[in-house]
Amino acid sequence: MNFSARIRQVGKVSVVEVTGKLTSFESGALRNSIARLLKEGRRQILLNLSGLTYLDSSGIGDLVHTYMSVIKGGGEMKVVGLTDKVEEILKITQLYQVFQEFQDEDSALMSFPGNGNKHKAPMLEIVRPNKN
């Protein structure tokens, strides 16, 4: 399966669905997709890696470069859908400490500021008694 990065917008968050193998042959494809998003001013990025079947050292480099570009651009990048293989690689390389990972897309989307996280900061209603 060839590498692809499909982008869709959910509120203010750009969800990048990564599928296939991220290797030296596809080097730069993910970077280019993220660079385009940053150029368009889209700084809240969620990588859905559930379709990523293989990752080599060049792919790891792409992930790191992508993450650094987003952070330097004042954005946030989070990941969801790690397969066992990809999760193992991220643990071996210690990158699991860098990427904020979520179990499902909904929780990841809710974690971005201004994207429906109203449950985290409930409104406090102040009721004043009448003086009649």
Image (cartoon, grey):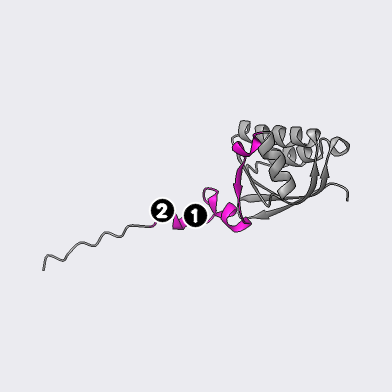
- Where does residue 118 sit, x and y in percent of width and height? 46, 56
In the image, taking residue 87 as reference, residue 126 lies left or right, namely left
Give the image quarter of residue 32: top right
The residue closer to the viewer here, 57 or 72, is: 57
The residue closer to the viewer here, 18 or 118, is: 18
The crowd level at tag 1 (other Cα within 10 Å; few <14, some 14-19, many 20+) is some
**Does the stretch in magenta take in 98?**
yes
Which label sits on residue 131? none
The residue closer to the viewer here, 97 or 10, is: 97
Residue bearing the label numbered 2 = 121
The crowd level at tag 2 (other Cα within 10 Å; few <14, some 14-19, many 20+) is few
**Residues in magenta, as a range:** 94-122
Q: Which residue is drawn at 75% across and 35% down?
A: 60
In the rendered structure, which amino acid carries the disc numbered 1?
Asn
Residue bearing the label numbered 1 = 117
In the image, taking residue 83 as reference, residue 71 lies left or right, namely left
